[in-house]
Structure formats: C-alpha cells, structure tokens
Image: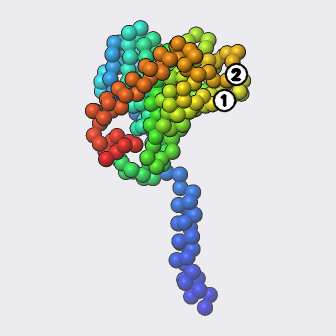
Amino acid sequence: MSWIMSRALLPIHIALCVGLLSGCWEGISRRVLATVLSVRGEVLYGSAEKNLRPIASDSTFAVGDVIRTSEHGQVDLILIPGILARVSESSELHIEELKLVKDGNETAGGMRNRIARIHLIRGKLTIDFEQPDGASAQLSVITDQMTVRAEPGCVFVVEKDKGATRLTCVSGKVYASQKDGKAGMVAQGFFRAFPSDRQMAVPATDDTRAQADTTAAIEAARQLRELREAQLPPRNRFPFSG
C-alpha cells in the first residue's frame, strides 16, 4: 500500500522540484565583446601597455582591454546590446565587465540581465543607455573620485580630468557614489563635479561647460543610434529587435 502511495505521489514530487529549480534559476551568464561602430583618428587598444595596437572597424574588445584615444581620436562602441558609448579624444578606459545573462543558449530573446562596468582612467565618455525590452540592466562607470551607476533610459557624460570628475545627466537619472561613502542622484538637466564644495547637483543651464556637454551628448546619442541601426540586422538591435 505504501509503495502504491509513493508511486502516486512521484509526479507531485517531480513537479515540486522543477518548480523550485525554476524559481531559483538565474540564467546562463555569458561574457560578450564590445564592438566598433565608428573610429576617427588614432585609437589604440589591447590587454597590456606593450600590446596596444590600432583599432579597426572590425575590432572587438574583451574584459581586461584598454582603449586609448589620441588628441584627435574618437571611437563609438556598442559595449553590450542596448548600451552605446562614445570615447572622446585624449581618453583612456579599461573594460572591467561585460556580461549578458540569458535563459538559455538562444541567440535572440530570453534576455534576463545585462551588466557593464567601465573604469574611465582619463578623458570623456558619453553613454546612451537604452531602455531594455523586458530585461534588467546594470551599468557602472568608475573613476578615481567616484562610481556612477545609471538607470536604463538615460544619456549622460562622465569626464575625468586630473584630480576631478564631472558628471552631466542629459536624460533619465544617474547615481554617484564618492570614495568617502557619500552618494547622491543627478537628474536630467543637472551636473555635479567631484570633489566640489557644492553638495547638490547644479542645473546645467547655470554652467557653460555643462550646456556644451549636454548639446554634444544629444548629438552623440543620435549618431550612435543611427550607426547601430545602419550596421546591425534587426534581430541584433536589442532592445529594439524586430
């Protein structure tokens, strides 16, 4: 009798186990490569100082790579699907993490999360962080002064110059955490400098440099999306896939 009851309960146990596994399933993590949308002037990249070489239109960049632009260099990138970046002249950055988390091995769909972490060593980085379609996303830009964490659906500029960092939010909102533990939000149309005597974000309209950064970032975001649309087939244009 107990044997019969055990067999009858077996499907229930299997269903329960499957349900528990599904509830804890975090997806498959895959490292991805950043790709070039356009390059102008001299731009170098590599995994170490002695291995730096010129960027070409078909170059790709992995975790650990350094990208360095010359005085007249500029490169436009897809860091990961949905996160576009422009590295301005006289800049240097280090790629610390690029990762997609998917439900399975599918090449399209099933996206759970996107993660990118960039260390801006010097210069200027403009980011167009697009709103994902049903997937979460995490983006961090690190400098010596702070860490910027952005929400999807924003455009912002981070500039590292000597001992200071400037953060200008063009759309959406971003969060800045300083090395001393202080943190704050910078909303659309505002900027902050780190370090600074000002403890609050300042309207970009009150600062000539922030106004210029805002105008340039709007144009950069437009160009980045046009380049992405022109070069990628619709199925790869996450999060606006067809």
- Name which of mark 1 and mark 2 comes first in the sequence: 1
Residue 79 coordinates in the image, percent (x, y): 43, 31
Q: Residue at x 68, y 29 (%)?
A: 183
Judged left or right of residue 120, residue 61 is: left
Element under label 1?
strand
Q: Residue at x 44, y 34 (%)?
A: 83
Q: Is residue 201 visible?
A: yes
Q: Quadrant of the N terminus?
A: bottom right
Q: Nearer the viewer, residue 64 or 190?
A: 190
Q: Residue at x 47, y 16 (%)?
A: 212
Q: Are marks 1 and 2 in contact (CB under 8 Å)?
A: yes
Q: Which residue is mark 2?
A: 199
Q: Residues within 10 Å of mark 1 (few under 14, many from 20)?
A: some
Judged left or right of residue 182, residue 162 is: left
Q: Residues within 10 Å of mark 2 (few under 14, many from 20)?
A: few
Q: Is residue 67 visible?
A: no
Element under label 2?
loop
Q: Is residue 104 above or below residue 203?
A: below
The answer to which quarter of the image holds residue 174 is: top right
